[in-house]
Image (cartoon, rainbow, N blue to C red):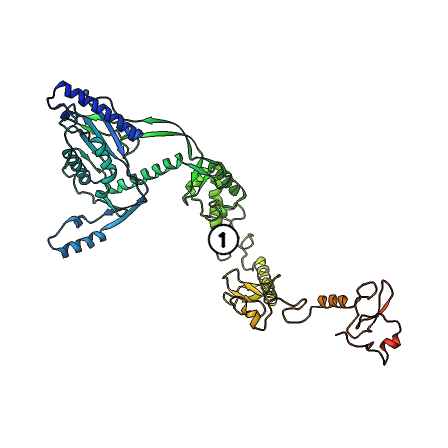
Amino acid sequence: MAAAALVDDELPEEQLQGNSRIQEDELLALQAIYGDDMLVFDNMDGLRFFQISLHYQLQGDIQVYINVDVGTNETTETGDDETDDSEDANDGLLYACSLQHLPPITLTCLLPRSYPSTRAPHFVIVAKWLDEPEVSRFCSVLDEIWAELPPGQEVVYRWADWLSGSSWSCIASDGQMVLGPDASSAPARADERAIGRSLILDSTIPLMQRYSEERSQETFDQSVHECGVCFSENTGADLLSSLSFSNLAIGDRLVSTEICSEFHPFLLYEICAGRNFMHLPCDHSFCIKCMEAYCSIHVKEGSVATLACPDTSCRAPLPPPVLRRLLADEGYARWEWLALRRTLDTMPDVAYCPRCSAACVAAGDDAQCPACFFTFCARCGDRRHVGDACEQQKQEVSAKGQRKLEELLSLREVLRSTRQCPSCRMAIVKTAGCNKMVCGNCGQFFCYRCGRGINGYGHFFNGGCGLFERVGMGRDGQLDEEVERFMRAVRYTCPDCGAKRTKAEAGANNLLTCQRCQARYCALCRKRVWEVSRHYGPRGDCQQRRMWY
C-alpha cells in the first residue's frame, strides 16, 4: 500500500495544500468521534497514516455456527433444488458458541496527496475472525461508496460508519452468524486489501470466546456496581494507566504486530490497581472483601455444602475457579479436602482407616487400607472379626428396632393431633384461629373439623361445621376437663363478695359456703340462703342434691 501511494496524480501546489488542510480537519474529526479506537501513526513519506478499530454494537448475544458441509454453498437451477439445498445447509450447521462481543474490524488508511480531489485513500481491512471472501466483499462496497461521491468529498467516516453498522447484514441475520468451512488448501486472495481468517475454526472459535470474555470483563470493570451484602458502591476495578501498541508497515502491506491478542491490531491495555467487585457466573455481583470473608468463614467452619451465591433468591454453587481466586492457598486446599471428604461420605462402600485416616473401599464389612495395609472392620473400626459377629452391628440392629418403634409412636401422635390435607396428605396442626385452613405445601383450603376441601366460607354457614370451635370443646365435641372446672368456677359465684367457688363433683351439695365472707348461698339460683329448711324444703324451688347441669 505504501508503494502504491507514491504513484499520485499531478496537481497544482495550491490544490495539494487544500487537500492537506482537508485531510488534517478530517483526522481531527475522526479522532473526536472514535477516541481511543483510533491510532494515528507517524507520517509515511509525508503521507498521513492511521488506523481505526470498529466494533459492532450487539443488541444481544450472537449465536455462532460452523458450516461443516462444504457443498452447501452450491446453487442449482430449479427452485426445488434450492429448497433442498437450504434444508441441507441447515443440517450442515453445527452450533459453536454464544458471544456477547465480537472482535473489531480494523480499517487502516493511507491518504495520498491527491485525496480527496481525485484519488481515494489506500486502505486495508483486517478481520481475522471472518472468512476472507466476506472481507473482500467489504472492500468492494468501500470502492462503490467512493465512486458514488462527488470529487472533493471526504469518505473515511462514511467507510467507517458502514463497516461498523451496515456491514452487519452481510455476515449475520436473526442473531446468528455462520463461519467456515475450513478450506482444504490456501485459496488465492481475491483482494490484496482484505485480510481474513487464516487459522482453522478450532483455533478461531476459542480466540473469539476469549475476546468476548475479556471485553465483558473490561465493561464490568468500568461500570459502577452495588454489593448485595454490604451495599457499598464502586467500580469493578481501579484502573491506573493505559499502554498503547502500534502496528508496523512491512513492504507494501500492513502486518499487525499482534503483541497482545490475535484479534487486537492495536490494544489499549489498562493496568488494574486492584479489583473491587467480582462477577459470578450466575450474573450476581459482590465486592471482593465480602466474598473473601464469606468464603473463608464457610471453609473454616467446614460448611462447604452451603458455599453458594450469597443472593438468597439464587443460591447457585460457586465453581472452583471462583473459589481459587477468593481463597488463599491454604484455604483452597482445605476446601478441596472438605469437598472430597463430603463426596466420599455419600458413598456407602467407603470407610476410613482408623490408623492413617485414608479412604478405603469396603468389601462388605471388611476393608483394607491401601496406604498402611491395615485390615479392619468397616463398622466399628477394630481389627477384622474372623468368625465372630461385630458387637456394634448387634447394637445397631437393636437401635434400629428401637428407632422404628419410636417412629411408629410419633406417627400415631401425629395422626391423633393433626389433620391431613385432602390434596397432598400433608399433616397440619392448628394452634389458633378459625377452622378454615390452608395447606402450606400445596395451598389447598380445607375444613379442620371434617377434613374436606372447601372454597371460601360457605361450608361453615351451610354445613354442620362451625367456623370457630366452642370454648373448651375438643375436636370430638367433648368438654375438656380443665375447661369444665373453669366453667364451674365461673358459675358458682358468691352473691355478696363475688368470690368464685367450685363444687367437688356434679352431684354434690348445692348449698355452698363462701370461704371469703362465710356467706351461704345456693349454687342453682345464686341467692343467699338464710334458712336451709325453707330454701330447700317442700316449699322451696331448689333441690339441695340436684345435678348442676
Q: Is residue 444 above or below residue 152?
A: below
Query: Does the image show residue 372?
Result: no
Q: Is residue 121 above or below residue 306?
A: above
Please give the name of the residue rendered at 51% of the width and 67% of the height, measured from the top-left corner: 455
Query: Which image quadrant for residue 409?
Result: bottom right
Q: Pointer 1: residues within 10 angstroms few (<14), some, or many (20+)? A: many
Query: Which image quadrant for residue 397?
Result: bottom right
| In the image: residue 156, left or right of residue 35 | left
Q: Is residue 422 above or below residue 317?
A: below
Query: Which image quadrant for residue 184?
Result: top left
Task: Say which amino acid is labelled 1.
Answer: Ala
In this orientation, which residue lies closer to the viewer: 104 or 210? 104
The residue that label 1 is drawn on is 367
Residue 227 in the image, given as x and y percentages of width and height: 47, 39
The number of numbered badges drawn on the structure is: 1
Residue 313 in the image, given as x and y percentages of width and height: 47, 49
